[in-house]
Image (spheres, coloured by chain):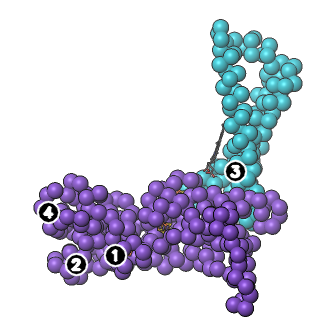
Chain colours: A purple, B cyan
Amino acid sequence: MSDFLTVRVWRGDEQGGFQTFEVPRLESQTVLDVVSHIQRQLDPTLAYRFACRVGMCGSCAMTVNGKARWTCRTHVAKVAADGNLELAPLAHLPVVRDLVTDMSAFFDKWARARGQFHPTATRKDPFARIRPDSAQRINADAGIECIGCGVCYASCDVVQWRPDYLGPAALNRAWTLVNDERDGAQAERLRAVAGDAGCHACHTHLSCTERCPKHISPTAGIAGLKRAAMKAALRGDL
Amino acid sequence: MNTRTEVRLWAAQRISAMVLGVCVFVHLITIMVAMRGGLSAAEILERTQGNWAWFVFYVVFVAAVVVHAPIGLRTIIEEWLGWRGTWLDILLVVLAAALGLWGLRAVWAVFA
Ligand code: HEM
Ligand code: SF4
Ligand code: SF4
Ligand code: FES
């Protein structure tokens, strides 16, 4: 382990460039520790985002040596064995400044994909009983732990090629709701996610699945949406 | 084009891809068998001329290509060139017709 890391950090907005910092190398250091060191000790004007530091809030994702990652739980030892780090904002989103992106488009797409739960019961009704071993519950479980970090979205080539594509996270969210028996907006949701800006644009590249820090497979959920939409279209319900 | 039609086209492309998968497999086996002891036009025509089974097989093969290729190209053109709308659909119907005519002409040539 060398004593110092050479860290190239993106500065400015889309027209910016990289600035180099030397950061002391520490045991068990995370990439977020490196960014925090730069902001606290070397340049207080550096803009970046984080909150929980333990992989729950989804706010700290950046491009680390060319790949989108959550930075609070990425160890420097894993990604910068040679002592070089390059940090840039997440891809496919407008850059506000330095390492901060504007994530509105990302979350607007969750809304467009009908990512909201539409209840069918009131508080006066009895609880829905969902068997833990039912196929639908298992499908929903597989996608429910998403923290909204945007790593999948930044890793997906189709998002780059088609800016209107809903993207893996929004579609994964829709898939968990398609499998929610209590939800009353199934037909509208399938209409919202089907078609050439929705699940049918996915080419099963699997980049999202490979990079998702929560080990979710948006690709599997998207394949489920394609099947559900196909059944609905062939029945004439879409 | 409305979402239902889009999804039906998508389904047609996947189903025709399955048909193509089977056809390509049969085609490859035929090539391997036919290549034994050399290949000649006479030998091929002897197998195909007047043979309804091969005729039907190749017509299905051509039909699957007619369905599969234009729908796939439509997706790729939309994605890479950003073209969409009625003109693109007309262009691809013309392409489908051309593929069908070329394919069926070739099938007829080895059957008749
Ligand atoms: C020969 C057997 C063939 C098989 C088994 C086959 C199979 C497939 C499959 C499974 C896909 C889906 C890929 C995806 O999900 O993105 C696909 C897409 C595509 N195929 Fe074929 N194909 C064959 C022949 C052809 C031919 C002859 C063409 C002619 C140009 C063609 C053009 C395309 C195009 C443009 C796409 C992209 C569509 C998309 O991604 O939505 N294919 N093919
Ligand atoms: S599997 Fe689909 S959503 Fe995931 S990265 Fe590939 S194209 Fe994008
Ligand atoms: S699916 Fe995974 S990578 Fe995508 S936003 Fe959710 S947690 Fe992040
Ligand atoms: S800071 Fe919350 S997930 Fe990294």
What residue is at 64 percent from the left and 76 percent from the top? A114
Q: Nearer the viewer, mark 2 or mark 3?
A: 2
Q: Position of residue A149 (x, y in %)?
A: 44, 71
Spatial separation of the CA atoms under disc 2 and disc 3: 52 Å
Neighbor class of circle 3 (other Cα within 10 Å; few <14, some 14-19, many 20+) is many
What residue is at 65 percent from the left and 72 percent from the top? A177
Q: Are marks 2 and 4 on the same chain?
A: yes
- For label 3, being within 8 Å of ligand 1 is answered yes
Neighbor class of circle 1 (other Cα within 10 Å; few <14, some 14-19, many 20+) is some
Q: Is residue A225 visible?
A: no
Residue linked to disc 1: A53
The chain under label 1 reads: A
Q: Secondary structure at mark 4?
A: strand
Q: Considering depth in this image, is B91 or A38 the residue closer to the camera?
A: A38
Residue A229 got which mark? Answer: none
As displayed, is residue A47 above or below residue A194? below
Q: Is residue A4 left or right of residue A227?
A: left
Which badge, 2 or 4, comes first in the chain's sequence?
4
Which badge, 2 or 1, comes first in the chain's sequence?
2
Residue linked to disc 2: A39
Q: Is residue B46 left or right of residue A116?
A: right
- For label 4, being within 8 Å of ligand 4 is answered no
Tell me the quarter of the picture where residue A140 sits: bottom right
Residue linked to disc 3: B71
Q: Amino acid at mark 4?
A: Phe
Q: Are marks 1 and 4 on the same chain?
A: yes
Spatial separation of the CA atoms under disc 1 and disc 3: 47 Å
